[in-house]
DNA sequence: GGGAATCTTGCCCGCCAGGCAAGTTTGCTC
DNA sequence: GAGCAAACTTGCCTGGCGGGCAAGATTCCC
């Protein structure tokens, strides 16, 4: 990926990814609390101080994967036809994304490590925070697809509920991997589909 | 409130509340980053160490109000007729709660302080985390009101989307207090109302 | 090749979470 | 009331963290 950019950019992306991978691996091995930032930095062959240049906390490093995926989701959303209903566009983008993840092939290792982190309530909170950081951005994109009088509120609601749905679906799938992920996601999105505006 | 309990319990509740108030006041006055835990403890006439006995971080103290309100919401939900549709029960409980808040009369001071904290993205993340900590509990309650084959997933989705909606509605109202809060909440809940299960 | 921009690292400071133990307050029983 | 146990507060202390700063290394671009 990112083949186009210069050496500097590629190196940065590489260390950022290395830090993320190290964080995830170590957290899965030893439990998230037993891992120090220093250990993560070592695992990526980088000084502790450099870690701080990339991430502002252990947890941010841990969920950098989610962050990247959400950014990708935004791109996929932008690629949807602009006259499509916003929720449908969101759903398509999300399903497209999970398909991509399967193509990557790395899903299995990822799933395994994520399963070991299941049930640490502190981590769930940080994950929710990571998702929440995206709400404004996503809401901005959605607002352009709405014509409502109060699009601002509607866009934020839709962004928040959609992200919550994706987050829960992923979590649920991690805990019940017997069902394929797309099926879980599809069901979750169906459950959360907003009613076509009952004009109360 | 809590008149029934013994002295010990009442004192604990009082210091916990005092710490929360101090945190909110100081954060609103000086900005959340410029406030140290020590200052909050001082503001509540308590040692720094005691702060840690009540809250595990500044942010937890800051959002203790939200936490309390969410607990109250759960009680109100339990008080709804058990044959009511889950989403309607949730909505009623939420509207009931905001009505209670207005009755309290302290909403104005609260609003003022919260407005000053608007736009600190780090805080929004922590708020999302506080709400996320409630998802499991709420989902548990909702699961009892569902008969679905996959109630587990449905309950979690509904809990997550509902909490996201309440959170966004509150935030939106803080930023646009010209509209009354119940109106904002009602609109938000209407936008997020799930469709009656399109059997895809 | 050479200067400018950028990145890495080590050093450092103030802050923070939480274990431990001594001292204090509350609850309970007689 | 007296006295004891449970629970709470506090100070002390440790390991870890976030981020400012400046010196040195690397990359970029002319």
Image: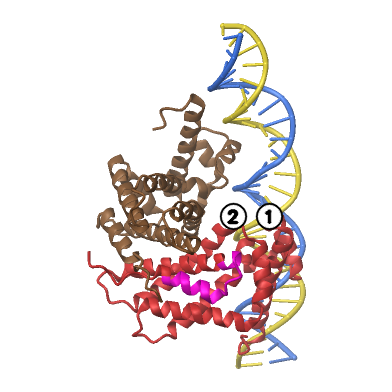
Chain colours: A red, B brown, C blue, D yellow
Q: State the residue position of label 1.
A: A33
Residue A141 image label: none
Q: Write the residue at 43% across / 54% down.
A: B142
Could you say which quadrant of the image residue D9 lies in? top right
* B4 on left or right of A123: left
- Where residue A140 appears, as percent x and y from the top left, is 39, 73
Say which chain tag 2 marks. Answer: A
Tell me if residue A50 can be seen.
no
Residue A148 located within the stretch drawn in magenta: no
Could you say which quadrant of the image residue B167 lies in? bottom left
Residue A122 image label: 2
Cα separation between marks 1 and 2: 10 Å
Q: Is residue B66 above or below residue B192?
A: above
- Where residue A135 appears, as percent x and y from the top left, is 44, 68
Give yes or no for contact between labels 1 and 2 (Cβ–Cβ under 8 Å).
yes
- To the question of a shared chain for discs 1 and 2, the answer is yes
* A106 on left or right of B7: right
Residue A189 located within the stretch drawn in magenta: yes
Please give the range of residues in magenta.
A173-190
- Where residue A65 appears, as percent x and y from the top left, is 60, 72
């Amino acid at each position: 990926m990112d083949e186009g950019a210069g050496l500097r950019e590629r190196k940065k992306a590489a260390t950022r990814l290395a830090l993320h991978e190290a964080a995830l691996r170590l957290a899965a091995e030893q439990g998230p609390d037993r891992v120090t930032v220093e250990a993560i930095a070592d695992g990526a062959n980088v000084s502790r101080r450099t870690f701080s240049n990339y991430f502002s906390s252990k947890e941010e490093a841990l969920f950098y994967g989610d962050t990247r995926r959400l950014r990708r989701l935004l791109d996929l959303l932008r690629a949807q036809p602009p006259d499509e209903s916003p929720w449908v566009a969101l759903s398509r983008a999300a399903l497209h994304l999970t398909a991509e993840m399967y193509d990557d092939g790395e899903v299995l290792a990822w799933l395994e490590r994520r399963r070991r982190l299941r049930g640490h309530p502190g981590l769930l909170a940080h994950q929710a925070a990571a998702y929440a950081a995206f709400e404004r951005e996503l809401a901005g994109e959605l607002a352009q697809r709405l014509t409502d009088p109060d699009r601002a509120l509607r866009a934020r609601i839709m962004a928040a509920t959609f992200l919550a749905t994706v987050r829960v679906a992923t979590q649920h799938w991690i805990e019940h991997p017997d069902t394929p992920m797309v099926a879980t996601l599809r069901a979750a999105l169906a459950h959360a589909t907003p009613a076509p505006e009952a004009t109360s």
